[in-house]
Amino acid sequence: MKTLLFGMTALMLVAGAALYAADAVPAEGTKAPGFTLKSQEGKDVSLNDFKGKWVVLYFYPKDMTPGCTIEAHNFQRDQPEFDKKNAVIVGVSLDTVDSHVQFCTKENLTFKLLSDPEHVVTDKYGCLSAFGKMQVAARNTFLIDPKGVIRKVYVKVDPNPHSKEVLAALDELQKKSD
């Protein structure tokens, strides 16, 4: 009986660890998980589309909410600086393509917002979160280098200073790689 209980406990621990690992945030220095999602333009966008560029992949909870609007405005404001650093900004939420169209139109956003209603990519990046009874993307960001390696991970982001934080990190990382 003890052997059976021990075996079942071990099996449950292994299964629990596997589930946890599937939802874990990818670590700095690891290959960024690939993806393909629809943008606000209704076109497929893949991580591979940005080979040779730095990618600011940011996950956010919901279109047209205060924190998400602040974060998007700050990335939009700093877009020219990201362009100079050969970096693209890509936002991901569980919102629909139509919601992204409305958000981009209302807030004059020009960078890509990707729709992940099935939370496939959000899961791959360990960013699925609960907000009451609703599931949303956690406010996390991944700075991915031109070779597809995650160089910086931000979790539980404060939307106000975040764009400037990412620019500063990008500047440091680019100096190191020169």
Image: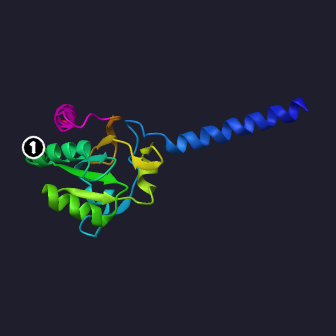
- Could you say which is closer to the camera, residue 125 or residue 138? 138
Looking at the rendered structure, the number of numbered marks drawn on it comes to 1
The quarter holding residue 12 reads top right
- Measured from the top left, where is residue 3 in percent x and y? 87, 32
- Measured from the top left, where is residue 105 in percent x and y? 16, 62
**Type of amino acid at the residue the image marks with label 1:** Glu
- Residue reaching furthest to the right: 1
Q: Is residue 110 visible?
A: no
Q: Which residues are magenta?
A: 157-176
- Could you say which is closer to the camera, residue 101 or residue 29? 101
Residue at (28, 69) in percent of width and height: 43
Residue at (8, 48) in percent of width and height: 80
Q: Secondary structure at mark 1?
A: helix
In-image side of 22 versus 88 (left or right): right
How crowded pointer 1 is (Cα within 10 Å; few <14, some 14-19, many 20+) is rated as: some
- Measured from the top left, where is residue 148 in percent x and y? 33, 48
The quarter holding residue 155 reads top left
What residue is disc 1 on?
A: 81
- Residue reaching furthest to the front: 132
- Could you say which is closer to the camera, residue 100 or residue 16? 100
The quadrant in which the C terminus is found is: top left
Is residue 69 placed above or below 164 in the rendered structure? below
Q: Main secondary structure of the magenta part?
A: helix
- Measured from the top left, where is residue 108 in percent x and y? 12, 57
Q: Is residue 27 visible?
A: yes
In-image side of 117 versus 87 (left or right): right
Residue at (80, 36) in percent of width and height: 7
In-image side of 87 versus 19 (left or right): left
